[in-house]
């Protein structure tokens, strides 16, 4: 099963309970983004534990994190459900990303280490095959890893902590918007991301900001209204 690997910089060993919880979070997150856990779906902790071969503690921890991100809704009596796709929420998140993410790209151009640059560039190594196969799970994982890598490379963890949850929300709409995309359209999106990586590697702060803004050029108004959950 694909995971987003958003916690890859934690430095924890594979046996660490905290890392195991992070992996459960990543698996549930990816299924939320892909719509495998659709808007409005009720999330039963026992069922999720069986689905992801995880302990209840890990599932509860993951749902708590996802609730803080606004991806699931937890209510004392009615339980946990997947949050709806809300265009107002998307628009507000886009406005926040447009302010923060280009700035992070500029900071990355100034501060990124060689290892940071290598991590950013390596994300889309298998993108051609994924685009040809229209493998949305793989492409979503690549996209999330890319934006998380740029955020971490900025050196400003406070901004990264704000930005990464916004990217998770936006990815749910990205999947809907690109669900019918052609291979050429997917590759055009990938090349825009690669351009960001190249410009960050060059150290050009202003060009990095501009390249990231081009990646963010699909505004909420350009996204068709998603289907309403039953």
Image: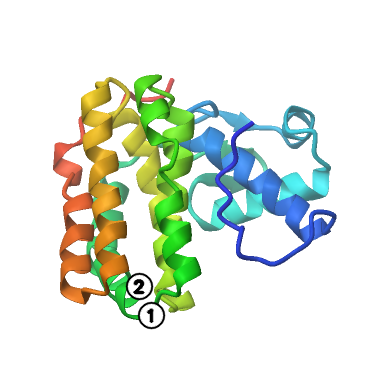
Q: In this picture, is 84 found above or below 184? A: below
The residue that appears at 48% across and 76% down in the rendered structure is 157
Q: In this picture, is 21 found above or below 86? A: below
Is residue 152 in view?
no
Q: Is residue 228 left or right of residue 113?
A: left
Is residue 118 in view?
yes
Residues at circles 2 and 1 in contact by the CB criterion of under 8 Å: yes
Q: Is residue 213 left or right of residue 194?
A: left
Q: Tell me where residue 29 appears, x and y as whole percent.
A: 56, 42
Residue beneath disc 1: 111
Position of the N terminus by quadrant: top right
Q: Tell me where residue 175 appears, x and y as whole percent.
A: 36, 32
Q: In this picture, is 7 found above or below 142? A: below
* Mark 2 and mark 1: Cα distance apart in space: 5 Å
Q: Nearer the viewer, residue 139 or 26?
A: 139
Q: Residue 18 appears in which quarter of the rendering?
A: bottom right
- For the residue carrying disc 2, how many other residues have a C-alpha within 10 Å: few (<14), some (14-19), or many (20+)? many
Report helix, strand or loop for mark 2.
helix
The residue that appears at 40% across and 19% down in the rendered structure is 133
Q: Tell me where residue 92 appears, x and y as whole percent.
A: 26, 56
Residue beneath disc 2: 108
Report helix, strand or loop for mark 1.
helix
């Amino acid at each position: 099963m694909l995971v987003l690997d958003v916690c890859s910089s934690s430095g924890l060993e594979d046996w660490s309970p905290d890392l195991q919880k992070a992996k459960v979070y990543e698996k549930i997150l990816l299924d939320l983004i892909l719509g495998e856990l659709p808007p409005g779906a009720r999330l039963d902790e026992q069922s999720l534990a069986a689905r992801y071969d995880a302990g209840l503690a890990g599932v509860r921890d993951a749902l708590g994190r996802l609730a803080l991100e606004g991806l699931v809704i937890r209510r004392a009596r009615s339980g946990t459900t997947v949050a709806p796709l809300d265009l107002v929420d998307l628009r507000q998140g886009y406005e926040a990303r447009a302010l923060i993410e280009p700035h992070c790209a500029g900071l990355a151009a100034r501060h990124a280490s060689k290892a940071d640059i290598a991590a950013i560039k390596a994300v889309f190594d298998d993108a051609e095959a994924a685009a040809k196969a229209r493998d949305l799970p793989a492409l979503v994982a690549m996209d999330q890893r890319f934006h998380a890598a740029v955020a971490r490379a900025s050196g400003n963890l406070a901004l990264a902590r704000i930005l990464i949850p916004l990217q998770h929300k936006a990815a749910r709409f990205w999947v809907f918007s690109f669900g019918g995309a052609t291979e050429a359209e997917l590759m055009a999106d990938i090349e825009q991301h690669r351009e960001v990586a190249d410009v960050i590697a060059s150290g050009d702060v202003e060009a990095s900001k501009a390249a990231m803004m081009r990646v963010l050029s699909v505004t909420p108004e350009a996204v068709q209204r998603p289907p309403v959950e039953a």
